[in-house]
Amino acid sequence: MRPLNIPPNIYEISHSWLSHNERVALIKKNYARLRGQGMPEVTIVIPAFNEQENILATLQSLTANITQKKVQILVVNNNSTDKTEAIVKSTGVDCLPEIKQGITAARNAGLNAAEADYIMNADADAIYPMHWIDEMVDPLKGSMAVALTYGRFSFLPVGNTGRPTYFLYEYAADALRYINKYCREEAVNVYGFNSAFRRKDGLKVNGFNHPVGANEDGYLALKLRNNGFGRLHYVTSAKALVWTSDRRIQMEGGFAKGLFTRLKKYFYPGTFVQARTDL
């Protein structure tokens, strides 16, 4: 079941009553616990461009995760002109500069600099549930037949569109993902803010690099699967449900226009570029 309403713990983080300094102190404390001593097992890579308004909520949710794994969080500052970098550094979270603009360059920089064996992809405007790390990484640890895990998401409204509308939209989108998985191309279901893979495998397929017309996240999934690293694994547990801002839909002109754009891309996608198998 998908939630009709925003869960209390997610709402508390997205509408935090803590002051800026209190939030920074909480993240710093929780990250020290999460990071632990020695080499991390998991690196969470977060590309960020001018995310000073959102990054603390994301970091607060990630550092609140319950796991026995040692976790590195790596924010890739992609030429932000606001206070994103200073805010991240104040929390004790690793911050890596990347001067080549773009999501692909930022994700590749994070992949190359990561210290852990497992890479998790996150975004700087999403809120993560407290069991997200284990739910996404454990299938990879449990079977070498799994090359990449990807999960579900729900929308946190910032515009005039309410949760009931998105609730129905999300169920319809789930049906289209089911069609993609079994009848079309499953890799298009993979989103960069909710997926995980083995670092060594990602490096072997040239990271997130992709041809024109493809997206960096789905194309990486395609390369991993087509090059024999295993299948794609869809994590449907509510414990891994990520909450992401609907700001991109609002930037496209609101829900109606955004829906039309997405349906057009789905039914008229153009030529899907297949991944090479000789990388």
Image: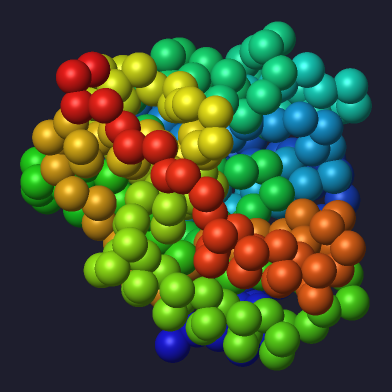
Task: Out of 80 and 182, give the one closest to the viewer.
Answer: 182
Quadrant the N terminus occupies: bottom left
Q: Single out the residue that lies furthest toward the top.
A: 99
* Image quarter in which the C terminus is found: top left
- Residue 168 occupies quadrant: bottom right
In the rendered structure, the answer to whether residue 169 lies left or right of residue 147 reads right
Q: Residue at x 62, y 69 (%)?
A: 263
Give 26 or 184, whichever is nearer the viewer: 184
Splitting the image into 4 quarters, where does residue 31 fall?
top right
Toward the viewer: 5 or 103? 103
Specify whether residue 67 is in view.
no
Residue 254 seen anywhere in this rendered image of the structure: yes
267 in relation to 74, above or below: below
Q: Residue at x 36, y 50 (%)?
A: 187
- Comparing 58 with 214, the one in front is 214
Please tell me which residue is depicted at 88% across the width and 63% down the height of the picture.
253
| Residue 10 drawn at (x, y percent) | 64, 68
Residue 147 falls left or right of residue 222: left
In this rendering, the answer to whether 64 lies above or below 196 is below
